[in-house]
Image (tube, grey):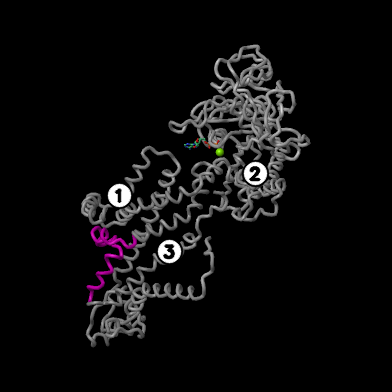
Amino acid sequence: MSHSITDATLRQKTIAGTLVILYASITMVPLLWIFMTGFKTPPDSISYPPKIVYQPSLEGYVNLFTTRTRVSPEKLAELPPPKNFAEEIVRNREMVIAGPSKFGERFLNSIIIGFGSTFLSIFLGTLAAYAFSRFSIPLADDLLFFILSTRMMPPIAVAIPIFLMYRQLGLSDTHLGMILLYTAVNISLAVWLLKGFIDEIPREYEEAALIDGYTRFQAFYKVVLPQAATGIASTAIFCLIFAWNEYAFAVLLTSGTAQTAPPFIPTIIGVGGLDWPAVAAGATLFLLPVMIFTVMLRKHLLRGITFGAVRK
Amino acid sequence: MAEIVIENLCKRFGAFTAVKESSFTIEDGEFFMLLGPSGCGKTTTLRMIAGLEIPSGGKIYLDGEEISRRPPSQRDIAFVFQMFALYPHLNVRKNIGYPLASQGMKRRERTAKILEVAKILGIEDILDHPVSGLSGGDRQRVALGRAIVRNPKAFMMDEPLGALDAEFRERMALELRALHDRMGATTVYVTHDQLEAMQMGDKIVVMNNAVVEQFGTPKEIYEKPESLFVADFIGSPSMNFLDVDGAIAEGQSQVSVKGIPIAVPQQHESAAGDVILGIRPEHIRFSDRANPSARVCAIEYLGTTQVITLQSDAGSIKARVDSSQSVEIGERVGLEFESCRISLFSSATGKVLRSALHGRTQDG
Ligand SMILES: Nc1ncnc2c1ncn2[C@@H]1O[C@H](COP(=O)(O)OP(=O)(O)O)[C@@H](O)[C@H]1O
Ligand SMILES: [Mg+2]
């Protein structure tokens, strides 16, 4: 805890507060705009001047999750009454729902690949970081540098070789392929970040556990891991954000079964004109998992590392 | 309970030698002190006994069994860390119970055992507190609790009072010693504080620069230092050292310092090179006719005694005399050395020369 020597005056507080709120508003406006657009009708979304007050509609979300076909008004009149709100919205545009769109599937792909690779990166990264931190490994510094160097190349530079390699191995457009790829990219970050965190945990904790009759692995699992929770949480967030947002590899290596949301969302734009509410709805939903994950782990991020029991 | 024998123990970290050829024996039930300046290898020695460090050479016996390569969990030795190393994510009760949980002890038994230990240490009322908010003394007690709860064969304590305030140290030192006397378990205690070692220990090993300088009771170490280092390190103020003129022959019982003759215990060993005479401040008396004569430079009043700094013909000397003796700065006095207490050291080897005071063998 640090305290300034004098308390801020009310005026200073007001100025600081205003600046923070102003900055927050500026950064939040685009997000808010996307969120709002998701609930507009297509005409509202492109009206000029832009509408701030409007009748909210779920049309964007319906369009996002469905494919539709246009029908003539006569045919429309012959159909039985709409079974749910989605059909009603679609029929107002003289269309019927032809089936589900690919968005749900792509979103699920993103979740599987994002969280799968995050888990794998953290799992392997923690073990490697612990080893680097605690044991004397021959050429440890060179190995660490080598691990970091895998991160230095831009994805685009290695995309073609990986594409060719994946085709040979039958890994292109598979979940496993994408999980392995994102893990390979993230693991350097994970090892480096986690090594820093684990270095900060005094060895005495594990040694106390060894003395208390536990094995090295039990000591790692029961004593080091709880201490490293903060580091693991923040590293996991970084890994997930990368895997979740990754575009270049995804575009090149996935097209169908394993396609993630980032390369999919732009394709919505092409379907049936500029359907901005559907794009905005997709973007909104796409933002949610990382936000929820971060909020869930926030407690660990803010808690700080409790070194309270060891006097430094 | 346990007897620990250390034989030619070595530890190297790469090219650096942290512990060199150390040998000593810790008898069953002893409160054993490992004393030496910072960085001399005390912690490393203790960690090797506990199994946290694998020796580069030598052997460790616990009750006759060679244990130097066993993992710590198979040695049944408890360790109290310098910084306590309480598990920060567990409360006091769980910290104390942790060694029992690893043994698979039943919850009921565990609860009873923890309570019993907490009572001994007087910490029953903080059992459910998190360890992060505890005072230094309570942390110390929890760390001790974790060590004694499993009834180990021996305790290793690495400067356990080092992290406490001065006033608290003394109380905790008494508590520790009382706890030891009550349980009678072999305890190895590391400290760099010679006073603490003298006060608390049954036996002391003095280490310096990775080697064992001397091993014995506090009295032996104080009265018969085996080396210049031990003589200088133990005692406050430390021993006076004066350069002896010329060499020493066997059977000699008088030396001269800057031409002044001084009686010494009969020597059993000759020495060719430079020799240093050592005498403790309390073995010097003032006597008008005695030689060397000296001038009083400073007086340090310590209650029952006073330490007088003197400039003598033989060099700078400190004497500890009774406070009732009146001494003035600038006064000239004669110094009388208690000759049977004098040690002679070879300057080349730093070792004591055998004499009537220092018998032939070290622990004889
Ligand atoms: N793991 C280690 N690697 C390298 N050097 C070490 C290691 N542990 C201790 N040392 C060195 O060994 C010497 C003795 O250390 P230590 O036993 O901790 O001394 P003490 O406890 O007497 O202060 C020190 O110089 C220290 O730097
Ligand atoms: Mg130490």
Q: Position of residue A265 (x, y in %)?
A: 28, 69
- Residue B65: in sight, yes or no? no
Q: Position of residue B219 (x, y in %)?
A: 70, 28
Q: Please check whether the numbered discs 2 and 3 fall on a single chain.
A: no
Q: In this view, does A98 lie above or below A74?
A: above
Numbered disc 2: secondary structure:
helix
The residue at which mark 3 appears reads as A294
Asked whether mark 1 and ligand 1 are closer than 8 Å, the reply comes as no
Image disc number at residue B146: none
Badge 1 amino acid? Thr
- Residue A246 belongs to magenta span: yes
B252 to the left or right of A102 = right
- Residue A263 belongs to magenta span: yes
Say if mark 1 contacts mark 3, CB within 8 Å.
no
Q: Residues within 10 Å of mark 1 (few under 14, many from 20)?
A: some
Q: Position of residue B262 (x, y in %)?
A: 67, 19
Which chain letter matches label 1? A
Prevailing secondary structure class for the magenta stretch in the rendered image: helix
Q: Is residue B23 or residue B225 the one in the foreground?
A: B225
The residue at which mark 1 appears reads as A150
Numbered disc 3: secondary structure:
helix
